[in-house]
Image (cartoon, coloured by chain):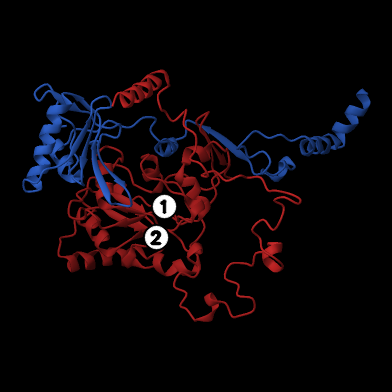
Amino acid sequence: MAASTKLMLSTGLYQKLSQFTRKLHSQPALLSSFRSSREVQELDQYPDVEVVANPPEWRFVERLLPPATVPQPEMKQEYPSGWRPQKEDGSKSGYYVARTKNHMVPVYLHTRFRGQRRITVVRRVQGDIWSLEKDLRAVVEQSRNGKLCATRVNELSGQIHIHGDHVDILRDYLKEKGF
Amino acid sequence: MAHLRETSDKALKLLRTLPRVQIGNLRPNPNSKQNDKRGRAQHGGDKHGAGNKGSGQRQNFMRLGYETGNQPFYMRFPYEPYYKGHHMKRQYPPISLLQLQVLIDTNRIDTSQPIDISTLCNSGLLKLKPAELEYGFQLTDDGLDNFKAKINIEVQHASEAVIAAVEKNGGVIRTSYYDPRSLHMLANPQKWFQKGVPIPSRMLPPQDAVDYYTNPKNRGYLANPEEISKERLVLAQKYGYELPKIENDSAYEMLTTTKDPRQIFYGLEPGWLINIVDKTIIKRKLE
């Protein structure tokens, strides 16, 4: 038994056998390069390599790794894109509109019936939602030259639905108030 | 009227004992459901709506548009194949200058480093799907007037106005081609490093893209750098702004950082193997 093992090792049979068994019952881990990778050849075919620990080029690799969390915005003198960081804490007005995880104002447009019905949705409202609805309706009605505007308040989920596309107006208004 | 009241009282009494009308205790309207059984034999086993004789009975439905030997309607008239080969064409999903400025303002992009596809994808807000023939990003001119960032950016397509907007702020823009495999690596570098495969070299552009990427007007990565610096001046005169001098800039080194035409990642050479677990780089030994 021992002699045959020695023989296999010495004649390269072992290598062939291992290749054969690999083909025979290969259950590679999902998404690995096991099956697609080339079989290992004679070692002298490969170039000499060195493993560099703490390489000076590691900063280039670190730059390519994505941040684990959404970065916190920095305070700057000006924001040319029109985006602004949140300032208001809501203690003055009695209500508070939280920013999204991406630091954006949560005002959205819901389009239904192939664009026939457009509804502006203000989300993440906390505190006195009815007074915010009153304020927002005043802003919308002013922009519509006094024409009335239908709204719906969902107190439980903290959402205000406003009939029509007033996303830009309301987003600007909330940003101006500091939310 | 007494009997009527009696009847309504009875009905109300009945209603009180009955369960509420709900979706759970309603049954479908009569005849709204089709019986999925098909009758057999003498009673009900006749033609089953398929008619008598021919292709109708045998249910060998003709292919769509076939007119039993006539020249079919869809082949009867000549047409101009506007969209021929549309499924083979390279796609360049747009990002506007406004979007880019928002990314910079919300601290999603670090302007102190050169920006490329991997920077945009790592922001987590933009996605590139090389499998759907997306060959990189094109920078569009939306929000051009509010763009105020000094950046070194590499995109795959950019219009003249966009190039002017970037260079006006003292930035550098370059257009470069990546083959789908390189794009796959750039779209998610971390995932690709986890494979443990040496970095390949970037392929050269295909024949129909060579003209674009060798043109200094497009700031192509294969164009002559001297001609590019000349074109920068020409564009500044055309759009009427004074070209900021990069040579005197404190961020000169960052602004002039470029990739080799065969290089995929900044600072990492083809053939290197990145081990992100042990934080080592496996390089070929130099003789």
Q: Is residue B60 visible?
A: no
Q: Which chain is blue?
A: A
Position of A44 with respect to B169 (left or right) is right
Query: Residue B238, percent across and down?
Result: 19, 68
Position of B267 with respect to B194 (left or right) is left
Q: Residue at x 47, y 65 (%)?
A: B86
Query: Residue B61, percent across and down?
Result: 65, 64
Asked if residue B262 is positioned above or below residue A77 in the image, the reply reads: below
Q: Secondary structure at mark 1?
A: loop
Which residue carries the number 2 mark? B221
Mark 1 surroundings within 10 Å by alpha-carbon count, few (fewer than 14), some (14 through 19), many (20 or more):
some
Nearest the eye: B184 or B129: B129
Query: Residue B207, percent across and down?
Result: 49, 69
Q: Amino acid at mark 1?
A: Lys
Q: Which dot marks residue B259?
A: 1
**Could you tell which of marks 1 and 2 lies nearer the N-terminus?**
2
Query: Both on one chain, marks 1 and 2?
Result: yes
Q: Secondary structure at mark 2?
A: loop
Q: Chain of mark 2?
A: B
Asked if residue B140 is positioned above or below residue B40 in the image, the reply reads: below
Query: Residue A31, percent across and down?
Result: 60, 37
Mark 2 surroundings within 10 Å by alpha-carbon count, few (fewer than 14), some (14 through 19), many (20 or more):
many
